[in-house]
Image: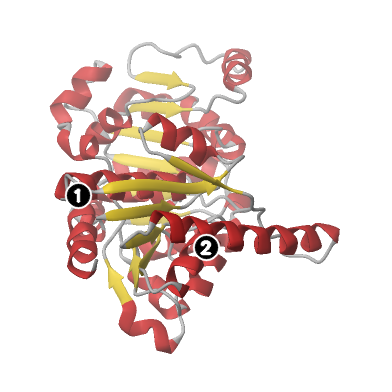
Amino acid sequence: MRVILTGGGTGGHIYPALAIGQALKKACPGAEFLYAGSETGLEKRIAAAAGLPFAAMDVLGWRRSLSLHTLKVCYKTLVALRQADALVRDFQPELVVGTGGYVSLPVVWAASRRHVKTFIHEQNAFPGLANKFLARRVDGVMLTYAEAARHFAPGVQKKLHLTGLPVRPAILRVSRVEGLRRFGFNADKPVLLTVGGSRGAASLNRAMLGLYGDRELTKRVQIIHLVGADGYEAYLAELKSAGIDMVNCGNIIIMPYLQEMEYALACADLCVARAGAAFLAEMTAKGVPGILIPYPFATENHQEHNASALTEKGAALMIRDRDLDSKKLLESVRAILYNEKRRIEMGQNSLRSGKPDALNRIVDLLTKHA
C-alpha cells in the first residue's frame, strides 16, 4: 500500500495524521508513506522527526475578508493544485488521508480527481472550511463528534463515520497510581489539572490566582497548573507579589508545560482547560470531567462547539472566556471536587463521550476501503 498523509497549520491537524500513519504502518508493514504539507508549516519539522518522507506544497491560508492577500492566496492555490496533481501522479498512492487545514485541500482534491481512495478526518464539533468543501469529493469523512454531522450537506451523510480522534497509546497506558507517584501526590486528595495550551491562556492563569488564595481549597485539593511557556516567569512573579509562596512545593505544582501529559491525566479528577479537540480526546479517553474555557478567537468558534458537545453530555461545564473570573472558576471547581457523587457521574459521562479505540476504528475503516 502507498499512502499520502496530509494536514497542517496546527498540531491538532498534524498529530492525528501521524497517529493514523503509524497505525496503518503497523497494520500493513510493507506500506510506503509520504507526508504532504506546507513548506513553512509545523508539519515539515514534525513529519521529519517522525521519520516520514515530506513533500512541500506552496500554499497559503485563506482569510475571511477580501484584500490583496486574497488574490495572492488564489494564485498560490492554483500553484498548489498543480503541485498536488504532479505529486499524486508520481507517487501513485492507493490511499490519501487528510486531517484538515488549508494544505490538505489541494492534495485530497487532486487525489479524488485521479480516482484515488480519499478519506478526511474532522477533529471538531464544527467542521473546518477545507473539510466541508472536500466532503462531496471524498470516499469517506471520519468524525470525532456526532454533532459535526449536521453541518455537512445531506448528500454527504452516507459517507460519515463516527470514529473519534486518535490518542497517543501512552495516554491509555499510564495508571492513576503511576500518575500520583510521578508528582508525589496523596491518593486521598483529588487532583485538579489546569492546562492553557503550549503558549498558555492569560485569562485562565489570572483566574487561577483566586484559587491559590483560597486556603480551604489548597488544603483539600492537589493542583498541577501548566501555565504555558509564554509568561511563565512573569506569572511566578505575580504569585510572589500576591503573597503566594506555594509554587512547586507540597500539593501545588506550577510548570510552564509538561511533555508527559499522560501522567497528569492519569491522576486528574478534574481538568480546567481550553477546548481544543486533541486535548479533549485525551481527557475523555481517561474519563476526566472538565471545566472548559473555549479560546474565543478559534476559527469558526470551533472550541465553543467542542465544549458545548461535552456539556450537553454532562461531561463538562463551560465558562466563556468573557465570563471567566476567579470567583466563577472557584465556585465551579468547588461544585465538582467537593461533590464526589457529581464528580463520579461527570467522569462516567466523560468516559462514555470518549473513544479510546478511535485509532482501531480508523485503521479498520481505511484498510477495508483502500
Q: Is residue 252 above or below residue 129?
A: above
Q: Is residue 11 above or below residue 105?
A: above
Left or right: 50 in relation to 26: right
Residue 268 in sight: yes
Viewer-proximal residue among 339 and 308: 308
Q: Position of residue 59 (x, y in %)?
A: 64, 53
The residue where tag 2 is placed is 85
Task: State the image quarter where residue 366 is shown.
Answer: bottom left
> How many neighbours does mark 1 have within 10 angstroms: few (below 14), some (14-19), or many (20 or more)?
some
Q: Quadrant of the N terminus?
A: bottom left
Left or right: 159 in relation to 126: left
Q: Residue furthest bottom?
A: 154
Residue at 40 percent of width and 29 percent of height: 49
Viewer-proximal residue among 216 and 130: 130
Q: Position of residue 126 (x, y in %)?
A: 48, 67
Secondary structure beneath label 2? helix
Q: Amino acid at mark 2?
A: Asp
Q: Amino acid at mark 1?
A: Ile
Residue at 33 percent of width and 31 percent of height: 261
Q: Residue furthest front?
A: 90
The residue where tag 1 is placed is 344
Sequence-wise first label, 2 or 1: 2
Q: Position of residue 332 (x, y in %)?
A: 42, 47
